[in-house]
C-alpha cells in the first residue's frame, strides 16, 4: 500500500547522515533534534505548542488526561475509525459514545454529535479520516454551547488545510483545543519507528501535556500528577525534520495519484470516487472507493494475483467489534458506517506512484469490474 523504500532512497544520504549524527551524539532521549523538530513543526502548523510523544495512540491518551476527564465522563467519537480512538477512551474508564458518519466524506456528522450530547458529555473527538478534515465550524459551535473539549484525531490528515466559511484556512489539528497525530511509518509524515505529537494554542493545556508525557514530573523526581512515559526518540526526530521539509510535496504527489485514479474511475457505474469536502483540502492518506454490487474480497484477490495490494479500511465498525460490544448498541444503529464498512476498498496510495504503476493498477481494477 505504501512504498517506503523508494522514498527513503530519495533522501538516503541526508537521512543516513542525520541518524548517524544522533548515534554519535549519544543524546538519544530528548536531545536537541527533538527540540528542533518541535519548533519546526510549530512553525509549519502555525500553532503555539507542539508536544512530541511516543505514538499517536499515546497522544490521544495524553490529550484526554490533560483535559481532566474522569471515569464515567462521556466522549463522543465516530463509529468509522481506526480502533485507537475508541481504545483510549475505554482504557481511561471513560464512556465512548459513538455516532454515525456522513456518506460522502466518511467523517463524523455534526448533527449526530449534537443529538448524542448528555449532561455527562465532556469531549468530542473528531477523526479527520483518510486525509480530509471534519466539518469543524458546527462542531466547535456545539462544543462552545455545551462547554466541551474538542480533541482532533489528526493521525491521517497532517498538512491538510481546514477551509473556514470566510475562506481563511488553518492546518488540520489546530482548530480544536488539542490536535493529536501519529508518525507511524505509513502515515503522511512517517518516521522509521513509532512517534506522535500533540498540538495546542492553549498554554495551560500545553504545560499539563508536557508534564504528563514525562511521568507527571515538572521538577526532576517531584511528581505532581500521574503521568506516562511517552517520548519521541532523537533518531526519529532527526528523520522527521528531513521529511517535514517535504511534507507539502508529499501531499502534492498523493493528490496527483488520486487525480489519476479519479480520471480512470469517475462515472463508473460500480464505483464512487472520494468526495471532496468544501471545508478541507485533501492530503489523501488513503484513496478509498465506494463500490456498488462488487464482491470486494474477490476484487482484492484479483488485484493480489496481479501484484497490486488493496485493503479494506475498515471492515468492522467500532460498535460491532468484540472488544467494544456494548448493550447500548446493536447492528443497524449506525447505518452509514455499516454500509461503508461493506462497500469501501482502498488502493495503493503513497508518494512514489508513477504513471506506469497507476496505469497498471487502474487497468487491473477495471478489468475485474
Ligand atoms: C494511526 C492512527 C492512530 C494511532 O497512531 P499510532 O501511532 O499507530 O498509535 C490513531 N488514530 C487514527 C485515526 C489512526 O489512523
Image (tube, rainbow, N blue to C red):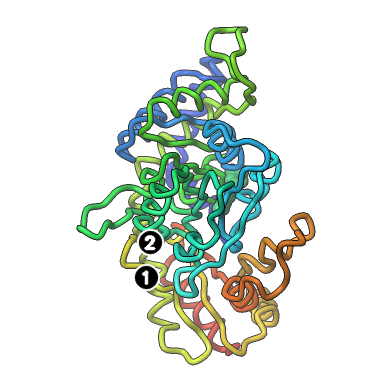
Q: Looking at mark 1, is its residue's CB closer than 8 Å to ligand 1? A: no
Please count the marks in the image.
2
**Image spot of residue 316 (x, y percent):** 69, 67
Furthest residue toward front: 119
**Image spot of residue 77 (x, y percent):** 56, 55
Instruction: Relative to 117, say whether 276 is above or below.
Output: below
Instruction: Relative to 233, say whether 44 is above or below.
Output: below
Q: In 3D space, how far apart are the residues under numbered discs 2 and 1 (Cα atoms)?
A: 7 Å
Instruction: Tell me the quadrant of the picture where the C terminus can be found.
Output: bottom right
Who's the residue at 51% across and 15% down the image? 25
| In the image: residue 358, left or right of residue 93 | left
**Image spot of residue 160 (x, y percent):** 37, 53
Furthest residue toward bottom: 269
Q: Which mark is residue 276?
A: 1
Crowd around label 1: few <14 · some 14–19 · many ≥20 (10 Å)? few
Residue at the spot of label 2 = 282
Amino acid at each position: 500500500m505504501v512504498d517506503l523504500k523508494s522514498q527513503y532512497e530519495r533522501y538516503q544520504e541526508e537521512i543516513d547522515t542525520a541518524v548517524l549524527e544522533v548515534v554519535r551524539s549519544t543524546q538519544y532521549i530528548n536531545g536537541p533534534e527533538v527540540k528542533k523538530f518541535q519548533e519546526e513543526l510549530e512553525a509549519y502548523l502555525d500553532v503555539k505548542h507542539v508536544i512530541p510523544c511516543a505514538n499517536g495512540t499515546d497522544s490521544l491518551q495524553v490529550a484526554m488526561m490533560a483535559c481532566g476527564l474522569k471515569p464515567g465522563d462521556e466522549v463522543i467519537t465516530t463509529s468509522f475509525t481506526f480502533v485507537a480512538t475508541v481504545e483510549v477512551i475505554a482504557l481511561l474508564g471513560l464512556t465512548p459514545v459513538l455516532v454515525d458518519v456522513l456518506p460522502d466524506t466518511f467523517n463524523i456528522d455534526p448533527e449526530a454529535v449534537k443529538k448524542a450530547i448528555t449532561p455527562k458529555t465532556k469531549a468530542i473527538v473528531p477523526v479527520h479520516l483518510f486525509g480530509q478534515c471534519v466539518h469543524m465550524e458546527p462542531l466547535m459551535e456545539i462544543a462552545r454551547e455545551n462547554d466541551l473539549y474538542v480533541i482532533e484525531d489528526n493521525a491521517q490528515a497532517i498538512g491538510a488545510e481546514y477551509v473556514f466559511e470566510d475562506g481563511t484556512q488553518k492546518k488540520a489539528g489546530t482548530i480544536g483545543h488539542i490536535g493529536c497525530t501519529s508518525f507511524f511509518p505509513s502515515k503522511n509524515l512517517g518516521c522509521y519507528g513509532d512517534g506522535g505529537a500533540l498540538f495546542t494554542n492553549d498554554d495551560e493545556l500545553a504545560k499539563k501535556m508536557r508534564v504528563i508525557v514525562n511521568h507527571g514530573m515538572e521538577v526532576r523526581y517531584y511528581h505532581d500528577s500521574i503521568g506516562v512515559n511517552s517520548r519521541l526518540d532523537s533518531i526519529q526526530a532527526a528523520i522527521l525534520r528531513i521529511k517535514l521539509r517535504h511534507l507539502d510535496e508529499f501531499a502534492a504527489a498523493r493528490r496527483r495519484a488520486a487525480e489519476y485514479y479519479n480520471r480512470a474511475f469517475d462515472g463508473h457505474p460500480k464505483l464512487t470516487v472520494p468526495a471532496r469536502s468544501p471545508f478541507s483540502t485533501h492530503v489523501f492518506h488513503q484513496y478509498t472507493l465506494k463500490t456498488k454490487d462488487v464482491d470486494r474480497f474477490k476484487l482484492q484477490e484479483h488485484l493480489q494475483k496481479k501484484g497490486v495490494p488493496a485493503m479494506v479500511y475498515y471492515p468492522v465498525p467500532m460498535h460491532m467489534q468484540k472488544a467494544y460490544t456494548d448493550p447500548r448498541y446493536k447492528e443497524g444503529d449506525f447505518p452509514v458506517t455499516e454500509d461503508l464498512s461493506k462497500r469501501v476498498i482502498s488502493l495503493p496510495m503513497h508518494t512514489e506512484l508513477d504513471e506506469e504503476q497507476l496505469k497498471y493498477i487502474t487497468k487491473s481494477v477495471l478489468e475485474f469490474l
